[in-house]
Image: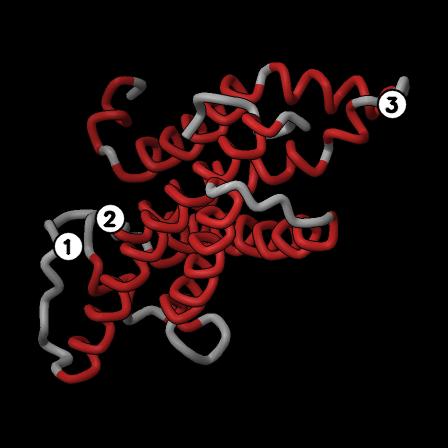
């Protein structure tokens, strides 16, 4: 998902952004659907052990039964199903050649901003409150962060064209889009390693 910058006004650049959203939508929707299915199974049988529970820190059951898994009073995967379905449709339309107006991208930006903030809240909760990981949750994180990043770059293209300090920052972000995204994802991975990989502690003991 890091092959090309989305913050470009060219038709090819917008089409690549559509592909990013399409891939993110497919991954996020698939992960959310699996989480919803496993949540229903847990509701039917509290003793049910989800197949994504691999032992140790990878314990989907603990994550799915936590208060954080229903942050708004209903299972979080329902949000994912609705949100990623929208991302998938938007990506399919843009990748197919549709060129919606600015209002469309502002709506997508608002949705992705909410999603990325919520995802990072869930990351914190999983690491430091629940104390467990779920592979399908991680898939949702991986889908959300690049989609947010490239939609943001696309919406910053006008800012990047301005001769201002903010414009310079936007230009640097666009020119180094892949580096920024890679560092972002690596920081999340480093938090997972630091929190759950026991041998890490022994290295610095």
Residue at (23, 62) in percent of width and height = 34
**Residues under numbered marks 2 and 1 in contact, where contact means CB atoms less than 8 Å apart:** yes
Distance CA(mark 2)–CA(mark 3)? 42 Å
What residue sits right under mark 3 in the picture? 162
Classify residue 143 by image quadrant.
top left
Counting residues from the N terminus, which is met first, the one under dot 3 or under dot 1?
A: 1
Residues 151 and 43: in front is: 151
Of all residues shown, which one is farthest toward the right?
163
Counting residues from the N terminus, which is met first, the one under dot 2 or under dot 3?
A: 2
Residue at (45, 29) in percent of width and height = 187
Residue at (21, 47) in percent of width and height = 57
What residue sits right under mark 1 in the picture? 52
Q: Which mark is residue 111?
A: none
Give the quarter of the figure containing the N terminus: top left
| Residue 189 relative to residue 49: left or right | right
Classify residue 61 by image quadrant.
bottom left
What residue sits right under mark 2 in the picture? 135
């Amino acid at each position: 998902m890091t092959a090309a910058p989305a913050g470009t006004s060219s038709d090819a650049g917008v089409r690549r952004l559509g592909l990013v959203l399409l891939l993110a939508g497919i991954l996020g929707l698939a992960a959310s659907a699996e989480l919803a299915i496993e949540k229903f199974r847990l509701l039917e049988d509290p003793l049910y052990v989800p197949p994504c529970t691999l032992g140790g820190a990878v314990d989907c059951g603990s994550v799915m039964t936590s208060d954080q898994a229903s942050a708004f009073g209903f299972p979080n995967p329902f949000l994912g199903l609705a949100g990623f379905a929208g991302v998938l449709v938007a990506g399919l339309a843009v990748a197919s050649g549709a060129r919606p107006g600015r209002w469309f991208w502002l709506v997508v930006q608002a949705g992705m901003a909410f999603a990325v903030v919520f995802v990072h809240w869930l990351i914190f909760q999983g690491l430091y409150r629940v104390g467990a990981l779920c592979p399908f949750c991680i898939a949702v994180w991986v889908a959300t962060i690049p989609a947010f990043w490239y939609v943001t770059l696309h919406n910053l293209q006008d800012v990047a064209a301005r001769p201002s300090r903010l414009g310079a920052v936007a230009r640097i972000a666009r020119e180094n889009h892949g580096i920024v995204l890679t560092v972002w994802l690596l920081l999340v991975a480093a938090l997972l390693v630091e929190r759950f990989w026991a041998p890490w502690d022994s290295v610095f003991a």
